[in-house]
Image (cartoon, rainbow, N blue to C red):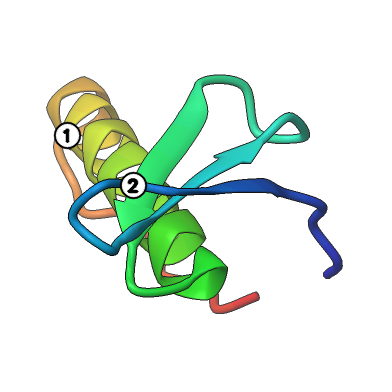
């Protein structure tokens, strides 16, 4: 998967990344991959919480 991001250097030296293909994806990390990974992880945790409470069983994990 290829994702396009805009990058800005923050005052503290970290990279602030925004990925318009992922609505609301604004994160920071030592690089753009780390920033996107952090956002995807947070979104996945929200989805897992919603699925678990709706179905009463854990979701199946699929790596992409």
The residue at the far front in this view is: 11
Q: Position of residue 54 (x, y in %)?
A: 24, 21
| N-term-proximal mark, 2 vs 1 | 2
SS under mark 1: helix
Q: CA distance from mark 2 to mark 1?
A: 32 Å
16 vs 50, left or right, is right
Please tell me which residue lies in front, 9 or 42. 9
Q: Pointers 2 and 1 in contact (CB under 8 A)?
A: no
Residue in the picture at 77% in, 34% down: 21
In the rendered view, tell whether residue 14 sits above or below residue 43.
below
Please tell me which residue lies in front, 16 or 61. 16
Residue in the picture at 55% in, 78% down: 63
> Alpha-carbon neighbours of circle 2 within 10 Å: few (<14), some, or many (≥20)?
few
3 vs 64, left or right, is right
Q: Position of residue 31 (x, y in %)?
A: 46, 72
In the rendered view, tell whether residue 17 sits above or below residue 26.
below
Q: Which mark is residue 49?
A: 1
Q: Position of residue 3 (x, y in %)?
A: 79, 57
Q: Position of residue 33 (x, y in %)?
A: 53, 72
The residue at the far bottom in this view is: 63
- The N terminus lies in quadrant: bottom right
> Alpha-carbon neighbours of circle 1 within 10 Å: few (<14), some, or many (≥20)?
few
37 vs 49, left or right, is right
Residue ID for mark 2: 10
- The C terminus lies in quadrant: bottom right
SS under mark 2: loop
- Judged by depth in the image, the label closer to the viewer, 2 or 1, is 2
Residue in the picture at 40% in, 71% down: 34
Residue in the picture at 30% in, 61% down: 14
């Amino acid at each position: 998967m290829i994702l396009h991001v805009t990058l800005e250097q923050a005052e503290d030296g970290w990279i602030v990344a925004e990925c318009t293909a992922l609505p609301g994806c604004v994160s920071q990390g030592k690089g753009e991959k780390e920033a996107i990974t952090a956002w995807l992880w947070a979104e996945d945790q929200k989805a897992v919480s919603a699925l678990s409470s709706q179905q009463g069983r854990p979701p199946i994990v699929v790596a992409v």
